[in-house]
Structure formats: structure tokens, C-alpha cells
């Protein structure tokens, strides 16, 4: 069956379509995709993964057409990001 594997860094995004066996898991698909060789900094043992935006486990089964997403850790410190004014805020 065909599935997708997606990963994004600030300078590069990659979305691969691959064929996996019917009994493939999220981990099987990530390993088979070759994405770990292209991005050696990915540690699937510690990073979160998802299927179509919903957090998944590495041993979750896949369905044809699923898109696996590998998530990076948030690197922006909320204390250093300027606060955006909400629409409707009338603090002036």
C-alpha cells in the first residue's frame, strides 16, 4: 500500500511517497522511507510522530494513503517571542 512520510526543517522540507506492506507500522515506514539517512539528527525514539496531524505511536498500524509526520522539538523560547496583540484587544 502507498503512504507518505513528511518531515520539515526551517531550510528543507521532504515528503516521500513509498510502498509498504499491508502490516507495516509507523516505525517500519519511517525506517523504510530512508528519511533517517537524509536527516541523521532525527531520533525516532524521542521525537513525536503523527498521522494526518494526530499524535501516533511508532507501533501503530497504517492504512493506505496515510501521511506520517515526524515532528521536531519547538526551539523558540516563548519568553523571547514578542506577544501578538489579539484582535479586539483595546488596551490603549
Image (tube, helix red, strand yellow):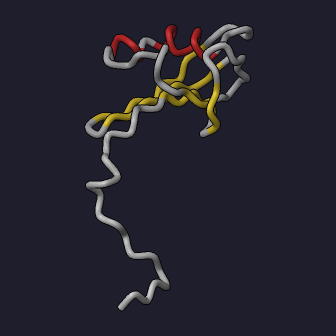
Q: Residue at x 35, y 52 (%)?
A: 78
Q: Does 14 sit above or below residue 76?
A: above
On the image, the x and y values in percent for residue 39 come to 33, 19
Image quadrant where residue 55 sits = top right
In this image, 39 relative to 27: left or right?
left
Q: How many marks?
A: 0
Location of the C terminus (image quadrant): bottom left
Q: Residue at x 59, y 30 (%)?
A: 50
Location of the N terminus (image quadrant): top right
**Along the line of sight, which residue is nearer the eye, 30 or 18?**
30
Image quadrant where residue 54 sits = top right
Q: Residue at x 47, y 19 (%)?
A: 46
Q: Residue at x 53, y 30 (%)?
A: 69
In this image, 10 relative to 42: left or right?
left
On the image, the x and y values in percent for residue 11 come to 26, 37
**Along the line of sight, which residue is nearer the eye, 29 or 3?**
29
On the image, the x and y values in percent for residue 16 come to 48, 24
**Along the line of sight, which residue is nearer the eye, 51 or 18?**
51
Image quadrant where residue 42 sits = top left
Amino acid at each position: 500500500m502507498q503512504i507518505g512520510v513528511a518531515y520539515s526543517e526551517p531550510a528543507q522540507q521532504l515528503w516521500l511517497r513509498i510502498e509498504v506492506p499491508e502490516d507495516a507500522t509507523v516505525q517500519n515506514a519511517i525506517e523504510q522511507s530512508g528519511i533517517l539517512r537524509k536527516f541523521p539528527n532525527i531520533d525516532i525514539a524521542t521525537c513525536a510522530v503523527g498521522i494526518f496531524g494526530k499524535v501516533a505511536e511508532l507501533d501503530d498500524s497504517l492504512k493506505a494513503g496515510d501521511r506520517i509526520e515526524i515532528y521536531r522539538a519547538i526551539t523558540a523560547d516563548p519568553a523571547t517571542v514578542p506577544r501578538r496583540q489579539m484582535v479586539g484587544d483595546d488596551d490603549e
